[in-house]
Amino acid sequence: MRIIYLDIDSLRPDHMGCYGYNRNTTPNLDKIAAEGVRFNQVYTAASPCAPSRASFMSGRFGINHGVLTHWGAGCHYEYPEGDGHSKEYPFLPRLLREADYRTITFSSFGDRHHAWWYFAGWNEIHTHTLKGGNEDAHEVNAAVLPWIKAHGAEDNYFLHIQYWDAHSRYTYPASYAEQFAGEPAPEYPAAEDIARHRQNTHPRSAAFLHWSDDFSKIPQDTMPLEIADRSDYEKLINGYDGGISYLDKHIGNLMEAFREQGVLDEVCFIISADHAESFGEQGVYLEHGMATEAVHHIPLIMKFPGLSKKGHVNDQLHYNVDVVATIADLAGLPKPSGWDGRSLLPALSGEQVEERSFLVLEHGLYACQRAVRTNKWHYIRTYHAGFYQLEPHLLYDLDNDPYQRVNVAGERPEVIEKLGAELEGWVAEQMKHNLLEQDPMMEIIDDGGPFRYLKPTDWAGRLERAGCKEEAAAVQERCGTV
């Protein structure tokens, strides 16, 4: 069996044609979706990059593998001590390799995030550049395509390929963004939303879109410097969609390489993302910085010849760790007892799997949050707001407020009580059976808070240079002088 995992950084499902997007961003991915199963409600258990890919490698929730941020406190991958490798908590590539699958990754993720655990168990690791995730799709394919030509027709391999083009900065040829000029962009945020968002002074806000006020390295043909109005927002969306279009073109080249090998119709494709991206939700742009719907809702497409029901759509709630359990099941392996996901293989033939009433989502890099997602509600508990100004409890009615404009926590105390109890019970249950001495979320808070890429003094200085002295003083008071 040939299993190809296309891991697309920062990809929102609602910017893909197969998920109903009006722009023709993903014609090649749409072809795969049409032949397989599309999952509409899949969520990354922990965001952003390092927490999510630690779940990919381990099959575990962030609270269990210990990675809820990118370095320091709260970013200690937990693995059983002792000689040898755990059968209860195996790394995905090692598990497959022990079952005689050749395991190959084309990804610079481990290099970018200094993640030792990412390198465990692969037969082959290809980082293709030293750019650490800033390479474009053509640079990825320059390494991948020769491998496919040499080995694509062989059997029993798991090939993981990561594309970064949907992640800022957008450094692909500008023509890919320009093709969408004049095409309708998503209706949210409207002009009045942007005007309201410009009152915010947190990083990645409408007025402070970029962390630094040195714009010399910003590719201004694909990215605006701020979001002053809808035209700036449309330029930002064109840039994002251009990156998706660029990587989709190169996925088309990948498919053609398998076709030339005579095996395209036999390949098992899995298409997903580590996390998605905010474009105005909660007043945040161009970032994956909270436990929100915009950040955690990811695409999942599976095409398994002979197993997947052509064109089927599944609307149940699922985690990204379910994908890891599905890969093991596809390879004929029992799910390890220490993994948190469940196989979705039955769903590929159109069956319903056991319904989950809620998911718990975690984020610890830019804010310390956990969220409870049900079919109707998205509840967010903020333990530390970082640079954001947030209420401790956020509650959105996704049926009636899909863009999460209005926090209804004050109006629905009974929902807060119920979902808050579900969250506390979930945390207590995970801490009862995991390998950790302390909840990694609390580690981050005890260490001073979620300030990895920016310190409060740095951001206060940025605000002062912009003439926002009162706001700068408020940051120092609210966040401390880390």
Image (cartoon, grey):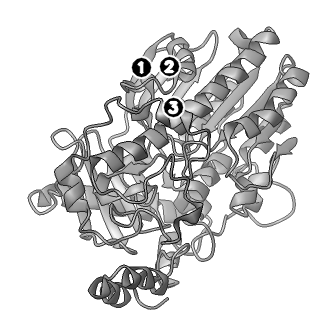
- Identify the residue at the far right of this view: 150
**Residue 342 seen in the figure:** no
Secondary element type, mark 3: strand
Residue underneath mark 2: 37
Q: Nearer the viewer, residue 212 or 91?
A: 212
Question: Could you tell me the amino acid type at mark 2?
Answer: Val
Q: CA distance from mark 3 to mark 1?
A: 11 Å
Q: Quadrant of residue 468?
A: bottom left
Q: Which x, y percent locates residue 387?
A: 38, 74
Q: Nearer the viewer, residue 419 or 1?
A: 1
User: Does residue 344 appear left or right of residue 207 in this picture?
Assistant: right
Residue underneath mark 1: 313
Residue underneath mark 3: 300
Q: Quadrant of residue 329?
A: top right
Q: Which x, y percent locates residue 166?
A: 54, 43
Question: Could you tell me the amino acid type at mark 1?
Answer: Val
Answer yes or no: do the residues labelled 1 and 2 have beta carbons within 8 Å?
A: yes
Of callouts 3 and 1, the N-terminal one: 3
Q: Nearer the viewer, residue 462 or 282?
A: 462
Q: Which x, y percent locates residue 162?
A: 67, 40
Question: Could you tell me the amino acid type at mark 3?
Answer: Leu
